[in-house]
Image (tube, rainbow, N blue to C red):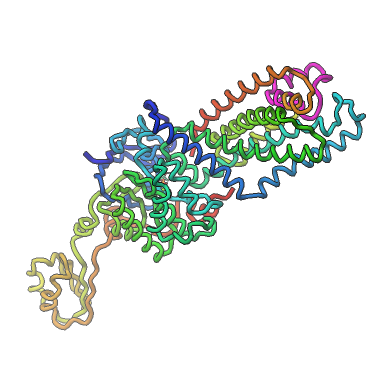
């Protein structure tokens, strides 16, 4: 029930920005207060790298996948997995916040609904970025991943786009649902194809055509492809295509998320 | 012009009418109480006024802004202390206030001063750096009160500010509410199902039952209209004819050595009355309470304390800020 907004004065813009900062900062504070959340979110991807990476790696000649070990090949895919699971489930918190009156404290603030939404989305994305940074450090130390300044910057940009879009998707689902169980059901349905049909676990090049097509339709594939190209130098689609798809995907999910957030059911 | 104008406000949940055609004007500076049992529709009214919920029909203006057409402007004028816990358990009291100040547009140069002031008024200065999960129910309530006042709203909604607290904590909270409202000179709509709370805090009370405002007056008038105080005197030989002639006595009943009188302002006329009752063994004066008012208006007692209809504060507070 957003009314028409009057022209924004400079003071009003400052007020919105400070509100945005507050909502973002709260998410970060809460995240940092619970180290178990950070540790927990790192363990799963590490297990995948160590166990799945070693297991599958043992049945593949070293260096046969585009000249790198399977574990290294897997690394960008695991970054994407971390983003998918962490960020989509971030939307669950909005449902938990709905059960008490905390969300109302935000919704009654004299801010635009889009500001509130962005604050939440950026907060969730920052949580995710912290996880990714830790994984990158561990990847460089233990899994032989070589980063350059350029590849670090590009990785951050790609990961951030994906974080914002998946967080927005999670927030959209969280805004429209009212039970955690319902949220779990819908997001499991969403995550499964997004992850397994993204080429995160296997190269796309030699797949049969029908599967190749499915992978091509999945926007997450372009994040996997971009990361693999930036971090490992393995090229699939062009980077230009990757970035175009990711930017469009981010825009669409943010629009969807804002739309859903404005219709939030308390 | 009244600061808050409500006209035929109605809210339905499917077939159920939670708020039924409520009209109300509230003046600047007033502390207005919505008194009614659980499920009467109090929270639903406040939620609509605070633009959290859209009305099914009717309208309301707050500080001249329409709650449906200009929700953002409305939110610029209001503050809300919610019925259920609404602060972050993992953050400290001060952090919760700081985030509120940023979101609700407190001027940067004033943030720290306002927070210090608020903490002092509710006596939480020494607990400000403690995480809220360690706060007692009363402390949490006090912090949320201070938070509601923090950004100097023109209108403040207090939804059951003392629900679920023990009587002593409740009384101390009333003092804080009084103090804060005097300090900030703001208009308050308060909801409660405690008669005493409405009596102590409010300039005017609207009694609400099943979504309808069934009576609207000052606490004083409510009680006055009940027809005066009830005086019971144990005595064996009262002078009934002369008692009936005393102007302030409206009703005389004498049964089994017990004399029951209905008297306007019994305190002032007690001397005169006792002169005509002979030897009085025991005298009791019962002034009408809002309980009596409610009973008379609805024909039923208002249950206090127990939670019906909604989740129950204590169980819900257990989830506060858990994440
Ligand atoms: N979101 C909702 N959906 C369905 N019914 C609701 C909803 N919110 C409130 N109600 C119902 O409306 C009535 C009034 O509720 P409420 O305003 O919370 O009462 P109060 O605050 O006076 O205790 C209750 O019967 C309650 O069950
Ligand atoms: Mg209520």
Residue at the extreme front of the image, as rendered: A149
Instruction: Look at the picture and state if A146 lies above or below B259.
Output: above
Residue depicted at 54% across the width and 35% down the height: A175
Q: Nearer the viewer, residue A232 or B2?
A: A232
Rendering coords of residue B66 (x, y %): 32, 33
Rendering coords of residue A258 (x, y %): 52, 29
Q: Nearer the viewer, residue B140 or B51?
A: B140
Residue depicted at 43% across the width and 38% down the height: B13
Instruction: Look at the picture and state if B201 lies above or below B72.
Output: below
Count of picture labels: 0
Residue B164's quadrant in the figure?
A: bottom left
Using residue B95 as the reference point, say whether residue B262 is left or right of it: left
Q: Quadrant of the N terminus of chain A?
A: top left
Residue depicted at 85% across the width and 24% down the height: A66
Rendering coords of residue B146 (x, y %): 40, 53
Per the rendered image, the range of residues in magenta is A197-225
Q: Is residue A182 visible?
A: no
Residue B194 part of the magenta-drawn span: no
Using residue B115 as the reference point, say whether residue A168 is left or right of it: right
Residue depicted at 7% across the width and 69% down the height: B245
Q: Is residue A130 visible?
A: yes
Residue B74's quadrant in the figure?
A: top left
Rendering coords of residue A207 (x, y %): 82, 20
Residue A233's quadrant in the figure?
A: top right
Q: Nearer the viewer, residue A175 or A39?
A: A39
Residue A210 part of the magenta-drawn span: yes
């Amino acid at each position: 029930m957003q009314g028409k907004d009057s022209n924004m004065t400079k003071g009003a813009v400052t007020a919105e920005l400070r509100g945005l900062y507050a909502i973002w900062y709260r998410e970060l504070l809460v995240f940092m207060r619970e180290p178990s959340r950070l540790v927990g979110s790192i363990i799963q991807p590490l297990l995948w790298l160590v166990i799945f990476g070693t297991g599958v790696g043992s049945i593949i000649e070293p260096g046969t996948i585009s000249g790198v070990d399977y574990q290294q090949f897997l690394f960008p895919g695991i970054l994407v997995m971390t983003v998918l699971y962490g960020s989509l489930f971030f939307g669950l918190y909005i449902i938990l916040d709905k059960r008490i009156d905390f969300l109302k404290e935000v919704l009654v603030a004299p801010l635009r609904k889009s500001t509130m939404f962005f604050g939440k989305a950026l907060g969730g994305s920052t949580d995710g970025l912290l996880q990714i940074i830790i994984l990158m450090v561990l990847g460089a130390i233990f899994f032989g991943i070589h980063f350059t300044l350029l590849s670090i910057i590009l990785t951050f940009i790609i990961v951030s786009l994906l974080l914002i879009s998946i967080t927005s998707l999670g927030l959209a689902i969280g805004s429209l649902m009212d039970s955690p169980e319902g949220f779990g059901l819908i997001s499991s349905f969403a995550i499964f194809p997004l992850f397994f049909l993204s080429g995160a676990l296997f190269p796309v090049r030699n797949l049969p055509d029908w599967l190749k097509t499915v992978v091509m339709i999945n926007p997450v594939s372009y994040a996997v492809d971009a990361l693999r190209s930036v971090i490992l130098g393995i090229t699939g689609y062009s980077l230009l295509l990757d970035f175009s798809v990711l930017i469009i995907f981010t825009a669409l999910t943010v629009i969807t998320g804002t739309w859903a957030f404005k219709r939030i059911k308390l | 012009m009244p600061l808050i104008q409500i006209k035929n406000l109605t809210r339905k949940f499917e077939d159920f009418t939670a708020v039924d055609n409520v009209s109300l004007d509230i003046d600047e500076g007033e502390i207005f109480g919505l008194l009614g049992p659980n499920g009467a529709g109090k929270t639903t009214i406040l939620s609509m006024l605070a633009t959290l919920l859209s009305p099914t029909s009717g309208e309301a203006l707050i500080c001249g802004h329409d709650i449906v057409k200009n929700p953002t402007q409305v939110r610029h004028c209001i503050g809300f202390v919610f019925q259920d816990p609404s602060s972050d358990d993992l953050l400290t009291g001060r952090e919760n206030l700081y985030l509120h100040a940023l979101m609700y547009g407190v001027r940067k140069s004033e943030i720290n001063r306002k927070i210090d002031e608020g903490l002092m008024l509710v006596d939480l200065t020494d607990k400000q750096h403690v995480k809220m999960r360690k706060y007692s129910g009363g402390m949490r309530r006090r912090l949320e009160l201070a938070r509601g006042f923090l950004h100097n709203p023109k209108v403040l909604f207090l939804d059951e500010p003392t629900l679920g607290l023990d009587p002593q904590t409740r009384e101390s909270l009333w003092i804080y509410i009084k103090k804060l409202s005097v300090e900030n000179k703001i208009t308050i709509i308060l909801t409660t199902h405690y008669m005493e709370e409405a009596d102590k805090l409010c300039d005017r009370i609207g009694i609400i039952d099943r979504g309808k405002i069934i009576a609207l007056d000052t606490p004083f008038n409510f009680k006055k209209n009940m027809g005066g105080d009830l005086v019971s005197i144990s005595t064996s030989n009262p002078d009934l004819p002369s008692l009936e002639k005393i102007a302030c006595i409206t009703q005389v009943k004498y049964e089994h050595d017990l004399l029951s009188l209905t008297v306007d302002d019994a305190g002032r006329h007690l001397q005169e009355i006792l002169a005509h009752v002979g030897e009085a063994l025991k005298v009791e004066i019962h002034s009408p309470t809002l309980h009596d008012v409610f009973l008379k208006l609805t024909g039923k007692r208002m249950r206090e304390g127990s939670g019906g209809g909604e989740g129950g504060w204590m169980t819900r507070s257990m989830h506060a800020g858990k994440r």
